[in-house]
Image: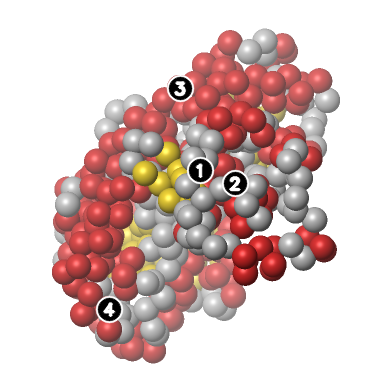
Amino acid sequence: MSIYKHLRAQIVTGHIGGGDKMPSLRQMASNLDVSITTIIQAYTQLEVEGYIKSRAQSGYYVITKDWSKEARIIEDPSMSIVDDNFNSFTIDENPYYIDLNVFDAARWKKSYNKVIAKYSPLLFFEGDPQGEASLRYEIAKYLYNHRGVIASPDQIVIAAGTQQLTLHLCRILKSMDINHIATEDPGYLPVQKIFEGGGYTLNKIPLDTAGIKIELLPRNIPSAVYICPSNQFPTGIVMPFHRRMEIIRWARENHSIIIEDDYDSELRYFGKPIPALQGLEKDAPVVYLGSFSATIFPALRISYMVLPPNLIHSYRHIKEDYSQTCSKLEQLTLAMYMEEGFYDIHIKRLRKLYGDKLSVALSVLENWDNENNFIEAQNTNSGLNLMLKIKKSFDSDLFCQIARKYGLYITTTPLENILAFYYSKAPLIKIKEEMPRLLDEWFNI
């Protein structure tokens, strides 16, 4: 049974009285030997449901109320909830670790409240299929200032996730008689599957040290190429300027389109972020993709694409066939969050925190007794993950499963003997304390 259910039962049955102060997050986490994240999740759910409330600079307190009706429901014998020994319960801890220090909820709440107070009449009308105008304006302004992307709000399309945007692109490209898609090999598989499902012929192009090999791209056939030039997944390759200009020239000469996925390019920790390929030439044949899920919080399923002028007309023909898949309230809140300058502050904070995490992870690897050069770090400058090359035969699924035991989120990749460690998802202290133990266990298998 989860901590949330146990605490709820303790409250409604009177074991924790109305007005009582709840233990602090750290104290509860220490008592139960679980992460603070788990306790925060439990307390947040109790607060949302009206069992407890937070007081600034004081903590959480139980709300005084007659809980008799709730108690009759909770005391169903099949639930077996009354037990003073918390450690007897199994903790359902989410293995997809999220570091709650990355997001300042107070600023988001301030933006949300401002939208409700000033613009609530807007919520009684359906959202624009292309996305709310205020958010498209803020995105256009942000991209110009921080990524060098040149676009008007009318060129921006908002949807719930990059995969949803890719579905739009499938229809737009078909209207242009483009039936071939080139992708990086290895590359981002979910997008490749969407294009395959859309009936496109996929041409997987290998990489060299500068990115996708231009000489292997289709010639004299209008096509599209999907690339991640600022932080290629999973290799971390950054496409240099000369290769970027080559691929733009290829697209112009072959009446083709470049799809630039810039999913985490802002998160560069050493040196300045690489300017986007889209802004290198005026009216470049580039569709630019971006998302807020990785930089704000995963549940915010707001992504966007910037269409070049020659694709806008095609999009307008199909846009009325779709309802907007993003919450209008969340779009307006995000627009306010950006207008107030909170997103800029958040990105700076994120770079500092993730940069520190990356440095600690690299320090652990450097100081660990790396006998026979067992493990090697790759992709060490940017993004959300660190690539770990294991220099011995191993079971990748088993290694990932062991990592979850230590609260570290590590996944397989298309590359042989390489795992992706998402340091973005783990608290700094956990990386420092648990990563050496993980490496010891891996090494001794």
Mark linked to residue 16: 2
- For label 4, the crowd category at 10 Å Cα-Cα, with few meaning under 14, some 14 to 19 and many 20 or more, is some
Q: Disc 3 and disc 1: Cα gap in Å?
A: 42 Å
The image quarter in which residue 409 lies: top right
**Mark before the other along the chain sequence, 2 or 3:** 2
Q: Nearer the viewer, mark 2 or mark 3?
A: 2
The disc labelled 3 sits on which kind of residue? Ser
Q: Position of residue 362 (x, y in %)?
A: 52, 21
Q: Is residue 425 above or below residue 18?
A: above
Q: Nearer the viewer, mark 3 or mark 1?
A: 1
Mark linked to residue 123: 4
Q: Disc 2 and disc 4: Cα gap in Å?
A: 40 Å
- For label 2, the crowd category at 10 Å Cα-Cα, with few meaning under 14, some 14 to 19 and many 20 or more, is some
- For label 3, the crowd category at 10 Å Cα-Cα, with few meaning under 14, some 14 to 19 and many 20 or more, is some
Q: Disc 2 and disc 3: Cα gap in Å?
A: 43 Å
Residue tagged 3? 359
**Mark before the other along the chain sequence, 3 or 4:** 4
**Mark before the other along the chain sequence, 1 or 4:** 1
- Residue at disc 3, secondary structure: helix
Q: Name the residue: 33% across, 41% down.
A: 56
Q: Is residue 355 above or below residue 234?
A: above
Q: Name the residue: 39% across, 89% down.
A: 321
The disc labelled 2 sits on which kind of residue? Ile
The disc labelled 4 sits on which kind of residue? Leu
Q: Is residue 325 visible?
A: yes
| Contact between labelled residues 1 and 2, with CB atoms less than 8 Å apart | yes
**Mark before the other along the chain sequence, 3 or 1:** 1
Q: Is residue 218 visible?
A: no
**Mark before the other along the chain sequence, 2 or 4:** 2
| Contact between labelled residues 1 and 3, with CB atoms less than 8 Å apart | no
The image quarter in which residue 282 lies: bottom left
Mark linked to residue 402: none
